[in-house]
Amino acid sequence: MPDGLDVDYDGLIPNNVGLSQDARVRRALETWHPGYIDWWRDMGPEGFQDALVYLRTAVSVDPAGWAKFGFVRMPEYKWGILLAPAVADRTIGFGLHRGEEVWQEVPGEYRAMLRRLLVIQGDTEPASVEQQRHLGATAPSLYDLRNLFQVNVEEGRHLWAMVYLLQKHFGADGREEAEELLRRRSGHIDTPRMLGAFNEATPDWLSFFMFTTFTDRDGKMQLAALAQSGFDPLSRTCRFMLTEEAHHMFVGESGVARVIERTCAAMREAGIDDATDVAAVRRLGVIDLPLIQRKMNLHCSLTFDLFGNEISTNAANAFNAGLKGRYREDRIDDDHLLATATYPVLRLVDGLVVREEVPALSSLNMRLRDDFVADVEGSVARWNRVIERAGFAFRLTLPHVGFNRRIGEFARGHLAPDGTVLTQAAWQQLMPEVLPTAQDGAYLESLMRPERRPGVFAGWIAPPKAGIDSKPGDFEYVRIEG
Ligand code: BYC
Ligand code: FE
Ligand code: FE
């Protein structure tokens, strides 16, 4: 049933793309599969390969009910290839081919561009699993441990999604890229992952929650832009991936909210009114709000880099080609060609932050980053409501887009989180106040002690409002002995 909602569950690789009738691609994927499992065992969650984990698996792409929950060992997880249902008579929504029928095969002239987009997207997925592989050892509860593993297996599935497209549409080149995706390693000196943020460490659970709030949200924005693609198989793949991404961001946002909730409750109980009295707060064994702000500054700025250069011909070319649109392109009311439109871009000119109107086509990365900021502001507002309800004056704020950047306009300068341009010396002095320090790391490490009793939570994080799949609070989400 190539275009159906139901997933063929019988073979090695569950799918709704008719693999059983496509011997060439099935063979390519089955050949790739052992290497993937080796990679998962080497680089996936360390120490939990035999544990039984209560995971959801996609069994349909019907938005009304695609998930089935059950206990599985992660290496036996059914990583499937799932495309959202085809939209009848879909046409290309933007760029030079606007109005033409969408492509089911890769147009020859765009082959290299599309291959690059798929490889970059694919590379981030295993990278994040690698970055998170040590976190199981210090999970604050079985509930959180399960959420980590759910995110990990789904990022593994996202790799499958890109590998399928590469193997189906790019022949021998695609098979080679699929192998390379298993060969690169996050943070490796010789064979690193492709994008900066995916070579950074995720040393503790606060980092994990920040990563899933900010960096997984770059995933959401990029997938949403690719979901607009005129290359229909990519569009359908991304549309289904987006339904999974929502849970990753929930894990992040609610994780940070629970840390804040616990910190505020502990401060209240101890009669601390000043949230910036770090020494007093740390004596309580909870995570002070200024440290949460520093972690947020770090992960937000690393994620800003993932949008690439503010001014980019790559982005313009991908748009003109009809391969990568804007966020919610189909809901934007304009000509979808951007032949004459302009867009305001922040630039660093002679040591000043200035706003310049530039051709909208060149500034698509900047626009997507602006859409990202608008999206993530909701999370920050919800975190601040937790602080406000507890009666503290402290507020978390997103750093300026020019803060701590390594890619783009602002990589040339040093900006404070409020956007003030600093001298090198002033930046050096400010850094320990605005980015996590070695002491912060050591303090967090001292808190990262595993809690494995069902229904019990480490002292630095509040329990969630509700269980996963409506399970009771003391549900044993992970059976560690298997
Ligand atoms: N690090 O013209 P520019 C996710 C390179 S996250 C290192 O601005 P473009 C997930 C760039 O590659 C979503 N290099 O580039 C989240 C280019 O190199 P070449 C991932 C960087 O193409 C959590 C050069 O600089 N998906 O799914 O306009 C967990 C010139 O740059 C970086 C995508 O990103 C960087 N940060 O924009 C799991 C979608 N930034 O080619 C998963 C696909 C730029 O000249 N990718 N460079 O050697 C794209 O659309 C674009 O490639 C980018 C870059 C937006 C990344
Ligand atoms: Fe992903
Ligand atoms: Fe994700």
Image (cartoon, grey):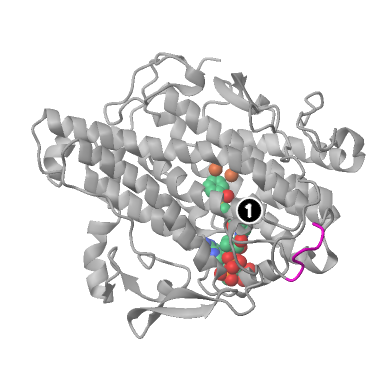
- State the image quarter where residue 352 is shown: bottom left
Choose top left, top right, bottom left or bottom right for residue 272. top left
Whether the magenta-drawn stretch holds residue 152 is answered as: no
At a point 51% along the width and 47% down the height, the residue shown is: 216
**Quarter of the image where the C terminus is located:** top right
Q: Quadrant of ligand 1?
A: bottom right
31 sits to left or right of 235: right
Q: Report whether residue 74 is seen.
A: no
| Disc 1 CB within 8 Å of nearest ligand 1 atom | yes
At mark 1, the secondary structure is helix
Question: Where, quadrant-wise, is the N terminus in this rendering?
Answer: top right
Tag 1: amino acid: Gln
Q: Tell me residue 235's x, y (percent).
A: 71, 50
Q: Magenta stretch?
A: 96-102
Residue at 65 percent across and 67 percent down: it is: 336
Count the labels in the image.
Answer: 1
Question: Does the image show residue 348?
Answer: yes
Q: Residues within 10 Å of mark 1 (few under 14, many from 20)?
A: many
**Going by the image, does 273 lie left or right of 330?**
left
In this rendering, the answer to whether 196 lies above or below 439 is: below
Q: Nearer the viewer, residue 401 or 478?
A: 401
Give the residue number, with chain letter if any, for mark 1. 121
- How far across and how far down the image is residue 117, in percent? 67, 59
Magenta run includes residue 98: yes
Q: Is residue 148 left or right of residue 361?
A: left
Observer-nearest of 401 and 103: 103
Coordinates of residue 34 in the picture (x, y in percent): 75, 35
User: Closer to the camera, 449 or 475?
Assistant: 475
Q: Is residue 377 above or below residue 1?
A: below
